[in-house]
Image: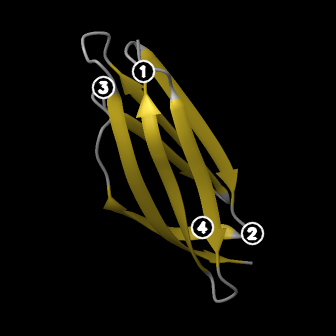
């Protein structure tokens, strides 16, 4: 049985740019949620890389908060996740 092992990171620069990465493995019939806070209000965001959420993913961006949930179906051995979201923010 696969084990859920996810890394979730948010990195920003001083010029109002950042990226949010969500990588690793989600085990069968499991899900993982990651929430990170940006240093300012997020004005735009876009996935530049995404894949592996066999039940789809749910992204919520609200003010300066990014929340992403990824689930894997019970019929899958595991789901290898590799997502990157880029964003702009203002302080």
Residue holding disc 3: 55
Q: Which mark is residue 27?
A: 1
| Residue depicted at x 70% and y 86% | 14
Question: Nearer the viewer's eye, disc 4 or disc 3?
Answer: 3
| Residue depicted at x 64% and y 44% | 35
Q: How is the image coloured?
A: secondary structure
Please say if the residues under marks 2 and 4 sit with CB atoms less than 8 Å apart.
no
Q: Which mark is residue 3?
A: none
Q: CA distance from mark 2 to mark 1?
A: 32 Å
Report crowding for label 1: few under 14, some 14 to 19, many 20 or more residues within 10 A (C-alpha): many
Mark 2 vs mark 1: which is more N-terminal? Answer: 1
Residue holding disc 4: 42
Image quadrant holding the C terminus, namely bottom right
Question: Nearer the viewer's eye, disc 1 or disc 3?
Answer: 1
Mark 1 vs mark 3: which is more N-terminal? Answer: 1
Mark 4 vs mark 3: which is more N-terminal? Answer: 4
Q: CA distance from mark 4 to mark 1?
A: 31 Å
Residue holding disc 2: 39
| Residue depicted at x 69% and y 63% | 38
Expressed as whole percent of the image width and height from the top left, the position of residue 89 reads 61, 75
Report crowding for label 3: few under 14, some 14 to 19, many 20 or more residues within 10 A (C-alpha): some
Question: Nearer the viewer's eye, disc 2 or disc 1?
Answer: 1
The relative height of residue 22 versus residue 73 in the rendered view (above or below) is below
Please say if the residues under marks 3 and 2 sit with CB atoms less than 8 Å apart.
no
Report crowding for label 2: few under 14, some 14 to 19, many 20 or more residues within 10 A (C-alpha): some
């Amino acid at each position: 049985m696969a084990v859920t092992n996810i890394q979730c990171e948010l990195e920003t620069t001083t010029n109002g740019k950042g990226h949010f990465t969500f990588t690793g493995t989600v085990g069968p019939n499991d899900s993982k949620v990651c929430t990170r806070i940006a240093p300012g209000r997020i004005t735009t965001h876009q996935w530049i890389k995404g894949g592996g959420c066999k039940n789809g993913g749910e992204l919520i961006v609200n003010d300066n908060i990014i929340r992403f949930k990824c689930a894997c179906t019970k019929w899958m051995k595991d789901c290898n996740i590799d997502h990157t979201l880029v964003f702009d923010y203002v302080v």
